[in-house]
Amino acid sequence: MSNYTGSEIFSSKTKVDKKDSKLVLANMIWVSFALLIGGTAGLLQTLVRSGQFELPFGIGYYQLLTLHGVILALVMTFFFIMGFQIAALSRTAGSFSTSELRLGWTGFWVMTAGTLMSAAMIALNEASVLYTFYAPLQAHAVHYIGLALVIVGTWISVAGQLMRYFRWRKENKGQKTPLLSYMTAINNVMWIVCTIGVAATVLFQFIPWSLGWVETINISLSRTLFWYFGHPLVYFWLLPAYMVWYAVIPKVLGTKGFSDNLARLAFVLFLFFSIPVGIHHQLVDPGIDAFWKGLQVVLTFMVIVPSLMTAFSMFAVFETYGRKQGARGLLDWFKKLPWTDARFVLVFIGMLFFIPGGLGGIINASGQMNQLVHNTIWIVGHFHITVGAPVILTYFAAMLFLLPHITGRKIDKIANRLGLFLAYTWALGMGIMSLAMHWAGLRGAPRRSAFSEYGGADIASEWITYQVMQAVGGSFLFIAIIIAILLFLKLTTGPKVNDPEEFPVAMFMDQEEPVVKWVENWRLLIIITIFLILIAYTVPVTQMFTENIPGAKGFKLW
Amino acid sequence: MSEEKDKIKKEEKHNEDNHHKLDLRGTFMMVMAIGGLMLLSWFGAFILFMERM
Amino acid sequence: MHKYEKIWISLGTASLAVFLIILGISAVHGGHTPAASGIETINPEHVREDARFSEPGLKEATDGDHDYDLYFLASAFMYEPGEVEIPAGSTVKIHVTSPDVVHGFQVVGTNVNMIAEPGLISTYEMTFDEPGEHLIVCNEYCGVGHTDMTSTLKVVNGGIANE
């Protein structure tokens, strides 16, 4: 079973191992739960900001916002990524060994413990510091320890996944590693390198400071270490979605992927360029010289290139498929796409959202132009049409086949229809909400702010009109989340079948071509990754130690 | 199984030969449209930035 | 690689390069480097004893090529000054710092948008040509009173510039 090759990987009958499936399911249960809680918080936020609603039971707006960020941006995504990657490895490299599986479960429980600790502190209003936890706002130490445990939990799970990947390589020397397995390894290596930053700031800065062992904290350093992690974090969310786009969707269509080698190259570029770019979140921060901001802007632009490649590959797959189905004209291949298959429609709508999402991202990262939009609600609009649409809709599509696959069921007509409703409702809600956010942001409306008339300023009343639109969008999104939860219940209950739903894994047009050797030379990849990080960060971080920036005492202002 | 593999191989070879001959006019048009939008949106933002300077 | 893909990647990358060149020229020759760049420290616990921030507001510049220095103190949950008048056409160097937590400093409708951190002074130079009123808001979460933090920047004809 552990020696998967060729036709076995691509057979529609090959399954995720039963024991591995249980671990995958455990992770996915957390995803559903986190989605429901985080989505409810999101709905309430948009209602508060419309000015028509006040929170009951003394719940604070920023308490809710902290919950929304932590539970969706960290908890939900992490559990999904762990679960999906374990499934992808088990499916394409073969079942996990006892020790690998034990690491997966240990990671799961450590993440669970950490999540519950942080959640308790947020519920007690001891941690209303938002998910970025900028110092010197000081939360309860248990909150920081909980967040650290969530990260440590992912490390443990990732260790098991990497062991599975390298075991395959050892057992199949000289062979091309299965693409999905390779992609999980890239994402995991990127994750280990980038989480060192957030672990360092939490362990050496926030925990001693919140426990009162030290009086002050170096703010510039904590922000820089956070964003050293914070930008690769968004690629950690995105790459599992790209795995589905590259390696699953062509099989859903019943065709082949465009190029295996180009897909690997795109992932290598993500490993190199997603980390040394975090300062583009700090373009208007004091304490960093303009030169180093500029350098990281240039590096940020490099990470756009693999997404340009991805756009081409996706359209190429769709067009090739459509032409095989008999399309002849310039664009009539669109009509041949499977518009009634929810797996495809969810992903396709996600891809459409990623077009304005990517274009907006280029503007945000454009150095001084960041001042147009920095910390305005435009930014919130931006990440809701990146992580909040392409990424999450692809996660939904993955759960659509994964949940019945691991529980021995099939996607039936009702489930497929729920999936389609989910896609369209989400598109409608997110379309309205994100458009309103982008426009209001360009007019200056700030993010991370409760309802306010700003002393009756004219411009603020203009913002409120857009905030009402956001509440309309938010309401549709909440309906979509209810549909998603019903869908997940439908997929995991009901009668089991003998031939469960397929975990589709696509072949590529260049499947038989030899793999480019250096893309799996991990020593080389890690050396280049670290080299780029050292170029981008050595001087700015050193200056934060040598320039005698006074430390800051903690404040609890909520 | 090996027969199946051979068949796959043959098919692969066939596809590889055609990789460059794929008709991707529509794809080209779509990515060029994205490129156009990229230029429009970026210069739009840049002009707004200069106006507010 | 398919011929069309080569064209697409080349043109795409070239456009990105053009964007970067424009940004670089605007930064170096137009003086539009990102706001708050550089490292200028101040002790956050003694901000009010500092001559510049003891009475924040508009002061005539004594050096540099700008006309005025505008000092702003951003604290939980207010800006000092709560209102400021700037003569139209003058070039102003804005200096902002915080004695407590991180705040935002955004002059709505302009490119003035930067983070204020305790321990550091954020600066940005800007010429205000058009008379009018701009709302100043805090756009970084700082606590329960976050949205109460406002000030007004009025660009007026005449004023001290013409005295």
Image (cartoon, grey):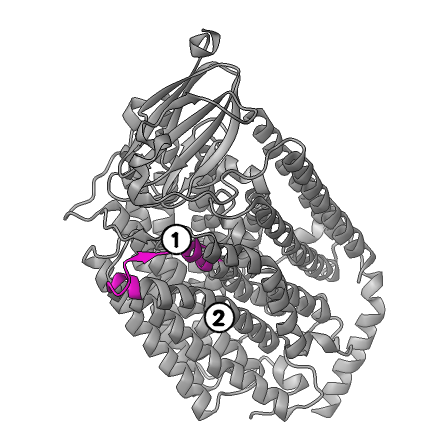
Judge the density around disc 1: few (<14), some (14-19), many (≥20) Cα neighbours within 10 Å.
many
Chief SS of the magenta region? helix
- Write the residue at 57% across / 37% down: A369
Chain bearing tag 1 is A
Of the numbered discs in the image, which one, if any, rests on residue A219?
Answer: 1
Q: CA distance from mark 2 to mark 1?
A: 45 Å
Q: Nearer the viewer, residue A298 or A492?
A: A298
Answer above or below: position of A427 versus A343: above
- Write the residue at 50% across / 81% down: A161
Q: Quadrant of residue A452?
A: top left
- Write the residue at 25% across / 50% down: A555
Labels 2, 1: front one = 1
- Write the residue at 26% across / 61% down: A210
What kind of element bears circle 2?
helix
Residue indicated by mark 2: A401
Answer with left or right where residue A69 lies relative to residue A321.
left
Chain bearing tag 2 is A
Q: Amino acid at mark 2?
A: Phe
- Which segment did they paint magenta? A208-227
Question: Residue A187 lies in magenta, yes or no?
Answer: no
Q: Where the N terminus of chain A falls, by quadrant?
A: bottom right
